[in-house]
Amino acid sequence: MDGPPASKHTMGSLPTILMLPPVGNSPAEQWVAAGRLASASDLVERLQQVGSFDPIYALAADSKQRSALVALGVDALEPVMTDFHFGQVLNDIIQEKNLKQLAYFGGASAPLLTAMHLQTLFEELRIATETKAIVNNIYSSDWFLLNEAALLAGIADRLPVDNPVGYVLSHDLGVDVQGMHPEAASRLDIDTPTDLAMLHTHPALGRHLEQFLAAEVGDTLDRVEKIARLLDTPASTLAVIGRCSSQVWQTLERSTQIWIRMFVEERGMVASRRLEHGEVRSLVGEMVNLLGPRAFLDRINTISDGLLWDTRVWMGMGRAWPSPADRFASDLGQADQIEDQALRELTRAALEADFPILLGGYGVVSGGIYALLESMPARSPAI
């Protein structure tokens, strides 16, 4: 008796593409780049441990990073010499390698994704009988698995970066897009120095990233520790500003005994291209500009004991977007290295405030919070 017809999505192994951006010139950018490489190395080893993600290709702008990944058994792709456009570059790789399905990871997008996570994701895609994508976050995708790679050709021009992938596949094409459960493994992407600092005690760190962070000390880690202690101090108050989700708020309320003040604005500003089109609006940002950053933070200090601030919303309010060097220096509290005057003043005000403040991007109000909460048992002494 004949069996059921084979699905057009039948899958053996899953070709995988990793991408690492240019290293940058400033010390802050180079520190983040080194952390990203450590994270990518851990991801490669975990993909190889599962065995179903094969072959693994790496597109890295820096020759030393390419060599490091090749030494782990990855196939290097030729670097892009022109202006980088994520969708076009990814589609070119799909065409060149004749990929029918694929997994894509930003090189530092999954520092806490374990081999068990990866095995589960692969199996969920393998058994799908219809077109399906699995993403870490539908509204801000840093990695995804897709069983019909050809779909990306038609939307390549709408993907200047990877973040809109899940949203575009779901909203524009009607694809079944499965988002991963909110946790540090699905929400923490190393985009900024603060993302690195907030995961430094997480129990799921791989060996490369653990070694990298063990050698790094600094004021940012001190501020992270102060925020972590606040989370573990009943009746404390934490303020959160930026693109935070309701799931993060719920997790904070379930996992801590603190009060939370949440000021949420501009979720999806990258995926919806509002940032690209100059359409970002922020009431909090207007208050910062009206009062000045020092007076604004003084006000915040009257209602909270600590602050997590996604400053990219404020940065996107119709002003010139600061350079990566300036953004990362701000996150690290290196005010004297910032050329953008407004950002330098905001950073200096945060450093001189009388309460702990962590500045960063989306991760500081998303994956970083999950990482701190999941690390709390490791911080507590054994009883």
Image (tube, rainbow, N blue to C red):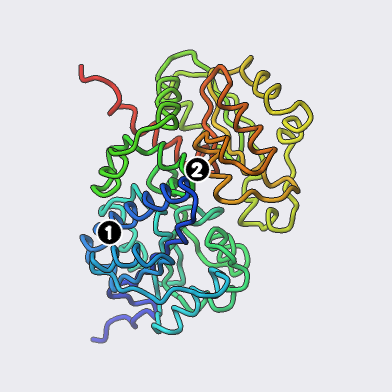
Instruction: Specify the label residue 34 is tagged with.
Output: none
Residue ID for mark 2: 363
Badge 1: residue crowd in 10 Å (few <14, some 14–19, many ≥20): some
Picture layout, residue 9 above or below residue 313: below
Q: Amino acid at mark 2?
A: Gly
Residue ID for mark 1: 119
Q: Secondary structure at mark 2?
A: helix
Name which quarter of the figure residue 226 lies in: top left
Q: Quadrant of the C terminus?
A: top left
Number of numbered discs overlaid on the protein picture: 2
Residue drawn at point x = 28 percent, y = 63 percent? 68
Give the foreground label among 1 and 2: 2
Nearest the camera: 149 or 335?
Answer: 335
Q: Secondary structure at mark 1?
A: helix
The residue lying furthest to the right in this view is 290
Badge 2: residue crowd in 10 Å (few <14, some 14–19, many ≥20): many
Residue drawn at point x = 30 percent, y = 57 percent? 43
Whether residue 330 sits left or right of residue 179 in the image: it is right
Q: Amino acid at mark 1?
A: Gln
| Percent position of residue 289, x then y | 76, 33
Residue drawn at point x = 37 percent, y = 46 percent? 185
| Percent position of residue 66, x then y | 34, 67
User: Does residue 111 show up?
Assistant: yes
Q: Quadrant of the N terminus?
A: bottom left
| Percent position of residue 316, x then y | 69, 47
